[in-house]
């Protein structure tokens, strides 16, 4: 039973670290710090891989039936599930923030495109406006 309790304690620690990391990810999103986001993303994937391996170890453990029958272990399982739900909620908030950032960047790109088109407006040989730059390809000698 000690081995399964140790696995649960490790799972709890990884979940707590993941929760802290997701909070740091939110700060990086708010600050639009791409380098920090990339680093946190790699760490997040490592935590998720570790969680998966711990889940597999717990599920395949010979004493896994104790997770629901032993009161101390089942309490630890419930605590871990609560932290996991908090992580999911925080992660969903970050996903919404990411969507907002993407929409903001798209609007910014559209504004830049419109500005570029206005500043590159020229007149063709018939006196009509054109935003297509020809780089002098229309000249005939």
Image (tube, rainbow, N blue to C red):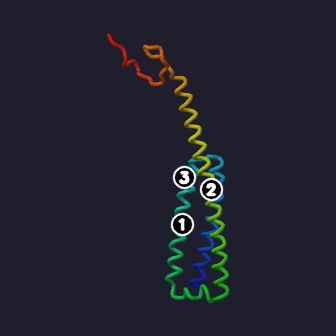
Q: Residue furthest top?
A: 141
Q: Quadrant of the N terminus?
A: bottom right
- Callout 2–callout 3 Cβ contact below 8 Å: no
Residue 69: x percent and y percent?
Answer: 62, 89
The picture quadrant where one finds residue 74 is bottom right
Q: How many marks?
A: 3
Mark before the other along the chain sequence, 1 or 2: 1
Q: Secondary structure at mark 1?
A: helix
Q: Which residue is mark 2?
A: 94
Badge 1 local density, few (<14 within 10 Å), some, or many (20+)? some
* Residue 21 in view, yes or no: no
Q: Which residue is mark 3?
A: 38
Task: Please tell me which residue is depicted at 51% across the width and 23% down the height of the picture.
Answer: 120
Task: Please tell me which residue is depicted at 59% across the width and 45% down the height of the picture.
Answer: 103
Residue 18: x percent and y percent?
Answer: 61, 64
Q: Please determine whether, in this image, residue 130 is positioned above or below residue 40.
A: above
Numbered badge on residue 48:
1
Mark before the other along the chain sequence, 2 or 3: 3
Mark closer to the observer (1, 2): 2
Badge 2 local density, few (<14 within 10 Å), some, or many (20+)? some
Residue 109: x percent and y percent?
Answer: 55, 37
Residue 80: x percent and y percent?
Answer: 64, 74
Mark closer to the observer (2, 3): 2
Q: CA distance from mark 2 to mark 3?
A: 14 Å
Badge 3 local density, few (<14 within 10 Å), some, or many (20+)? few
């Amino acid at each position: 039973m000690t081995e399964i309790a140790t696995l649960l304690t490790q799972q709890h620690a990884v979940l707590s670290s993941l929760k802290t990391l997701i909070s740091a990810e939110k700060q990086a999103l708010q600050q639009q710090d791409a380098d920090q986001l990339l680093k946190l993303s790699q760490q997040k994937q490592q935590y998720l891989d570790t969680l998966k391996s711990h889940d597999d170890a717990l599920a395949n453990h010979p004493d896994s039936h104790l997770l629901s029958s032993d009161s101390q272990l089942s309490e630890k399982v419930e605590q871990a599930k609560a932290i996991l739900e908090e992580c999911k909620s925080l992660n969903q908030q970050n996903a919404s923030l990411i969507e907002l950032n993407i929409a903001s960047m798209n609007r910014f790109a559209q504004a830049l495109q419109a500005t570029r088109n206005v500043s590159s407006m020229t007149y063709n040989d018939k006196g009509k406006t054109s935003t297509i730059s020809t780089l002098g390809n229309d000249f005939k000698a």
